Image (cartoon, rainbow, N blue to C red):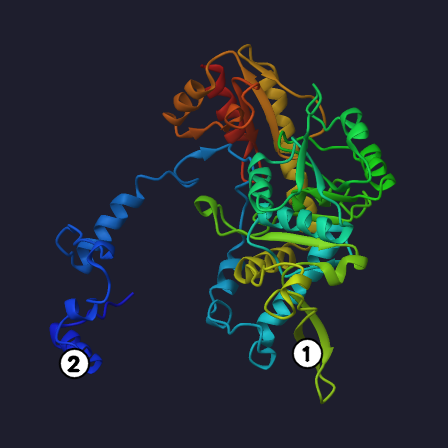
Amino acid sequence: MSYFPLSDKDRKQMLQEIGVKDFDELVASIPKKLRNPKIDLPQPLSELELRRNVTRLAQSNLSTDDVLSFAGGGAYEHFIPAVINHVISRSEFYTAYTPYQAEASQGTLQSIYEYQSMICQLTGMDVSNASHYDGATSMAEAAALSVNVKRRKKILVAKTVHPEYRYVLRTYLSGTDVEIVELAFNDNGFIDSNILKPLMNDEVACCIVQSPNVFGLVENFSEVEKIAHDKGSFFIIVGNPLSFVRFKSPGEWNADIACGDGQVLGNALSFGGPYLGYFAARKELMRKIPGRLIGMTKDSEGRRAFTMTLQTREQHIRRERATSNICSNQALCALAAAVYLTALGKQGLRQVADLNIQNANYLRDCIRKLSNFEIMFQGTIFNEFVVKTKKDVEEVIKSLLKKNIHAGLNLSRWYPKLKNTLLICATETKSKEDLDLFVDALSEI
């Protein structure tokens, strides 16, 4: 980016136009104790020096280009076809005008509409919004919707739902009188319906579960869904959208709302963001869905046109009637997801899902044979699983990093009782040679 610094002449002219002789006179009305002291900054750098300095700092980070990574836990390395970056890098999209003015932004509106349509197909739900900031925000908005629609003040959320999602949920509702109850998991790593049943009553607005859950296990929600709906509560499923290609989708589980992170759909890891949160629901909730929704209609000449619709946010209607204060969406990330889904198509998505399942199961079977490691939970997995190690898990991670291998995530950071457990992920980006190299490295510990 070019620099356009102000010269002393420029500053003097600006102060003269304002009607003051210098900067101190400009800020004279501000009490001295509120003025920031002069910051002891280093000498300015030239553009060449600055680039070198920033590059040096950036090299202190390790990316998946530098190490063989088996980390997952909510952010996943997937292959991203070149066409995605080519499309989203076009100036028509990354400098597009806000969709509030439909006549000036038909391209953006159409891309969001296509994204919404494909999310509905993927989740098996009736209607989708234009995306939220991330999966955690999406889940929190789903819970808030449930409280507002049901007029109830209790939320049940499984501890098998990603802990950071649950942190955001608590933060979102911290200023309200809503009670959040967390449901323990059983020894097999699944939500325990025996714990859920006595807690489910007429005060519960929603029951939130996740599949594949935080341990990578694919859940069976037959009993949980029945328990929730028998008491008139909403049933909300958080999940990896790629897994819905081969396992039951939220719609097939009779969920009221489906939400989660769409990072896996053509968006890079990017050290944690930006991502996008998908949000889909049954048609009965269409007018209650938070955020933007794009609809297709006809213009005055009968041509197909796209426009924002059902704008029930606080800047459009009376605040007390607004569904949410969310008034934006991750349009560029959602565009990447739409291009990804379009480029791969149904068959391509099936192949990606199958490779995730095959790689994760192959790796789990290989690690099962190692003497210092034990598979923590048994059950069907998508692309993640939990391993218990006889060694200190942090030492295992550090040891493998020396070999340019990221072994996974230390689960005890979220679950202190699961001491020395490692959450390992294997997506379609890993070859058999990569998997065998990882197993060999673990066997040497």
Instruction: Tell me where residue 328 appears, x and y as whole percent.
Output: 56, 62
Which residue corresponds to the image point at 59% horizontal and 40% vertical from the top-left?
170
Q: Quadrant of residue 237?
A: top right
- Relative to 198, is 393 above or below? above
The circle drawn on residue 305 is 1
Q: CA distance from mark 2 to mark 1?
A: 51 Å
Tag 2: amino acid: Gln
Nearer to me, 173 or 362: 173
Residue 319 higher or lower than 265, as above or below: below
**First in residue order: circle 2 vs circle 1:** 2
Crowding around mark 2 (Cα neighbors within 10 Å: few <14, some 14 to 19, many 20+) is: few
Q: Is residue 326 above or below residue 425?
A: below
Q: Position of residue 109 (x, y in %)?
A: 61, 71
| Residue placed under numbered mark 2 in the picture | 16
Most extreme residue toward the bottom is 301
Q: Position of residue 225 (x, y in %)?
A: 82, 38
For image coordinates 61% across by 65% down, the residue present is: 314
Q: Nearer the viewer, residue 172 or 92?
A: 172
At numbered mark 2, what does the secondary structure look like: helix, strand or loop? helix
- Number of numbered tags placed on the structure image: 2
Identify the residue at horizontal 60%, vertical 36% (top origin): 162
Q: Residue at x 53, y 41 (%)?
A: 75
Position of 244 with respect to 252 (left or right) is left
> Closer to us: mark 2 or mark 1?
2
Q: From where the camera sits, is residue 346 visible? A: no
Give the label on residue 412, or none.
none
> Where is residue 324 shown, x and y percent of the image?
63, 58
Indicate the quadrant containing the N terminus: top left, top right, bottom left or bottom right: bottom left
